[in-house]
């Protein structure tokens, strides 16, 4: 959000260079805990895979995240409370109104988080890239998360039926009902991802042109395991929401066709749970052949593209959370990220004051033993 999330709207300092908040402190003092708390307010799961029950401190009865934030129009509040004593009961409220699930927070508070693990986005497992899409789309399209939950449930059932067929406890035709379900949710997911990645690609390709000073060309696209190369699946426009019933029909036909081979494999082999984002530099697959520097640049532009797309879609810049990531980058890439984040409210963590000073103007906070103290009257 454009305004400083920790102040009242009237007090917020809206001059761009003041959006930078630098948190520094030794290891294990609570910097990532803070970043994680802000991130959870987006409605997404913890980026470091922390289970909800672990939000509560060891030997502590409860945890509470309270955040006030404001966009250009109004001030809002989020409260997320976990109570260990009552079977990890969870209470949440958005603007004072109780909500039942974290996903109801989608669309209220927008952020993009960038951790050292994200630098592996282009080289790492396809899981990380699917997670990238799922997180990015869920923040912009509430129904997407529900499609993913339903898809995961349907695939679990289909895999159980496959197992039972192999045990002689079910017959092949029992798969049909799950093929229909998977096709329904899978088609919605493919369509949303294609549209999302098309927009991300436009932005990431331009950003990559900038980071490589025009020397290299990035190409980024969505690869569907059901429709193989979505770009080359010429006669169908996957980005057209009107094509959804046709995507669904073909998805179901494909699943039906693979029933025998899925039974042999003991699971559902193809589907949106196996889809990918492909990146190429100058026509060469970067996952296999990219240098470490190229992979880091791709990860950076993918994250920045996400922030730009949120800003363009909702008309408000998301908060950007950089956890320990700038110090992992060389000076040229640091400069690129900071320049491209001008105008965003940024929270950046690092280990020492000397690193903090390199990040330019902003507010500086010292983190020790879970306490965050602003350093006032100490110029960077
Ligand atoms: N549920 C929990 N209860 C109590 N302490 C926890 C819990 N989860 C994590 N911690 C501890 O909180 C401390 C702060 O962790 P955090 O990851 O925020 O450190 P950090 O300041 O980011 O350190 P680093 O610079 O190494 O990344 C660590 O000692 C960690 O073990
Ligand atoms: Mg940390």
Image: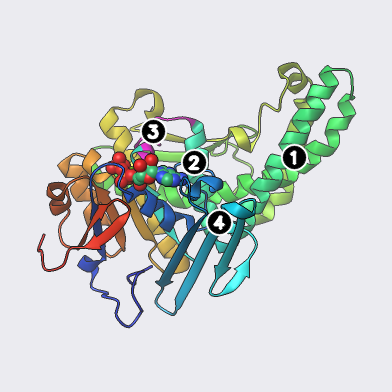
* Residue 55 drawn at (x, y percent): 49, 49
Label 2 with label 1: CB-CB less than 8 Å: no
Q: Secondary structure at mark 1?
A: helix
Circle nearer the N terminus (1, 4)? 4
Picture residue at 28% right of the left edge, 53% below the top = 348
Pick the front one: 211 or 70: 70
What label sits on residue 82 in the rendered view? 4
Q: Secondary structure at mark 4?
A: strand
Picture residue at 23% right of the left edge, 44% below the top = 26
Q: Is residue 319 magenta?
A: no
Q: Is residue 5 above or below residue 174?
A: below
Residue range corresponding to the magenta coloring = 117-125
In front: label 1 or label 4 = 4
Q: Which picture quadrant has residue 331?
A: top left
Q: Secondary structure at mark 3?
A: strand
Q: CA distance from mark 4 to mark 3?
A: 44 Å
Pick the front one: 234 or 230: 230
Circle nearer the N terminus (4, 3)? 4
Circle nearer the N terminus (2, 3)? 2
For label 1, the residue is 154
For label 2, the residue is 49
Q: Residues within 10 Å of mark 2 (few under 14, many from 20)?
A: few
Q: CA distance from mark 1 to mark 4?
A: 30 Å
Q: CA distance from mark 2 to mark 3?
A: 29 Å
Q: Is residue 275 above or below residue 261?
A: below
In front: label 3 or label 1 = 1
């Amino acid at each position: 959000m454009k305004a400083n999330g920790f102040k009242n709207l009237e007090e917020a300092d809206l001059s761009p260079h003041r959006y930078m908040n630098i948190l520094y402190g030794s290891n294990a003092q609570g910097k990532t805990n803070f970043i994680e708390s802000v991130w959870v307010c987006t409605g997404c799961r913890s980026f470091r895979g922390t289970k909800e029950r672990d939000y509560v401190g060891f030997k502590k009865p409860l945890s509470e995240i309270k955040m006030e934030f404001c966009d250009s129009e109004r001030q809002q509040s989020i409260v997320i409370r976990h109570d260990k004593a009552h079977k990890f009961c969870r209470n949440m409220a958005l603007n004072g109104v109780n909500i039942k699930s974290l996903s109801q927070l989608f669309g209220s508070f927008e952020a993009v988080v960038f951790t050292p693990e994200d630098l592996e986005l282009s080289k790492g497992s396809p899981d990380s890239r699917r997670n990238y899409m799922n997180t990015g789309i869920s923040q912009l399209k509430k129904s997407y998360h529900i499609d993913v939950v339903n898809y995961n449930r349907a695939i679990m059932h289909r895999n159980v039926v496959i197992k039972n067929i192999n045990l002689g406890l079910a017959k092949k035709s029992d798969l049909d009902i799950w093929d229909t379900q998977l096709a329904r949710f899978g088609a919605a997911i493919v369509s949303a991802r294609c549209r999302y990645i098309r927009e991300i690609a436009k932005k990431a390709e331009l950003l990559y042109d900038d980071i490589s000073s025009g020397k290299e060309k990035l190409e980024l696209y969505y690869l569907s395991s059901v429709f193989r190369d979505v770009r080359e699946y010429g006669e169908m426009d996957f980005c057209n929401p009107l094509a959804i019933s046709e995507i669904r029909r073909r998805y179901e036909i494909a699943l039906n066709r693979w029933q025998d081979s899925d039974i042999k494999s003991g699971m559902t082999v193809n589907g949106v749970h196996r889809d990918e984002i492909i990146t190429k530099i100058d026509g060469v697959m970067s996952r296999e052949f990219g240098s470490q520097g190229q992979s880091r640049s791709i990860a950076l532009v993918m994250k920045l593209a996400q922030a730009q797309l949120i800003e363009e879609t909702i008309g408000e810049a998301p908060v950007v959370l950089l956890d320990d990531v700038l110090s992992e980058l060389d000076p040229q890439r640091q400069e690129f990220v900071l320049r491209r984040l001008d105008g965003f409210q940024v929270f950046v963590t690092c280990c020492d004051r000397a690193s903090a000073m390199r990040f330019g103007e902003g507010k500086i906070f010292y983190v020790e033993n879970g306490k965050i103290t602003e350093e006032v009257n100490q110029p960077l």
